[in-house]
Image (cartoon, grey):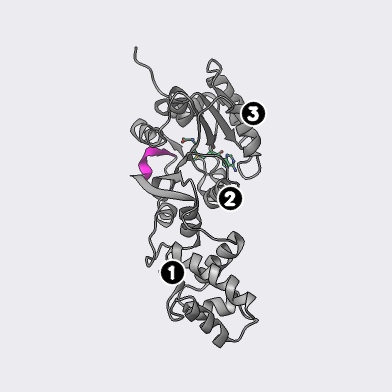
Amino acid sequence: MSHRTISQNTKQILAKYKLGLKKSLGQNFLTDDRVLERIVDAADLDEQAGVIEIGPGIGALTERLSERAKKVVAVELDQRLIPVLREIFEKQSNIEVIHGDALKVDFHEIISENFGECNSIHVVANLPYYVTSPILIRLLEERLPLQNIVIMIQKEVADRLVAKPGTKDYGSLSVLVQYYTETSLVTKVPSHVFVPRPNVDSAVVKLSRRPEPAVNVSNEGLFFKIVRASFAQRRKTLLNTLHSQLFSHLAKTDVAEFLTQAGIDPQRRGETLHLAEFAVLTEAWERFSQGR
Ligand code: SAM
């Protein structure tokens, strides 16, 4: 039996429900079944998997996810889409549509209320680009019990998530994400597969949660403070940027001494440091500040 997917019916569904799309909510809907398939494949779902989808739109990805997972909870901010989604998925008992803001909903509660019988939990989403970073940071910092996160995002942001030290894309977001997860680029996605067509290219990225963070630090807050300060003025040396951003209460010579004691050349730029070196700096600062 041939069956038209939601993505193939995007224009008809938008017309039927008289839905104008809101640019302000990042509403660019995916209309390519092969791309949808690649996203779902990358998540490694099985019949015991629980999936949180952020921003289901009219449900193109939701439909695919529900065929492969035990349960899908789709969180959509646009109130107009809630009755549409509920009608489209009326007969699918493994889809729960929640009206909410992914920046505010209680993910721990969503997980405990919906995925009790699931063996693994995943986030899979074609994310609204204007809130990609805050949503991602939330998902990681809240230490949700996720096996992986597979997201379609703006290509430039994808490059930052997988960037290696010493490259122009490497920054504090790269370190944060790589601290908690192993990142890989699944595929690039051209803009013409969306309705409406966005101005930017996109990419799908997979983030697999590490059992333990990539490096061991005794003070995570300090680790991230040092990381942010190190990237705050990218053209400056580590010595200058750390002095002005974090250690302005010290003489510059003391900051230089601290870096040297840590085995990091003060003349290097922050963007050349690997995660392990940021960890070394964090531990060295704890020792250095205690000895003063
Ligand atoms: N999943 C659909 C697809 O792949 O075609 C739609 C993706 S569209 C890029 C992003 C969706 O996220 C829109 O439906 C938008 O209304 C929704 N959205 C925007 N901001 C949101 C937020 N803060 N929380 C939840 N959903 C949001």
Q: Residues within 10 Å of mark 2 (few under 14, many from 20)?
A: few
Q: Which residue is mark 3?
A: 113
Q: Is mark 2 within 8 Å of ligand 1?
A: no
- The reply to whether residue 189 is visible in this rendering is no
Please name the amino acid that badge 3 sits on.
Glu
Query: Label 3 crowding class (10 Å Cα cut-off): few <14, some 14-19, many 20+?
Result: few
**Label 3 CB less than 8 angstroms from ligand 1:** no
Mark identifier at residue 271: 1
The image shows a total of numbered marks equal to 3
Q: Is residue 188 above or below residue 277?
A: above
Q: Is residue 83 left or right of residue 269?
A: right
Residue drawn where x is 51% and y is 56% of the image = 176
Residue 141 is marked as 2
Marks 3 and 2 in Cβ contact (< 8 Å): no
Q: Hey, what amino acid is under mark 1?
A: Glu
| Mark toward the start of the polypeptide (3 vs 2) | 3
Q: Name above or below for residue 196 compared with residue 264.
A: above
Q: Which residues are magenta?
A: 191-195
In the shown orientation, is residue 100 left or right of residue 34? Answer: right
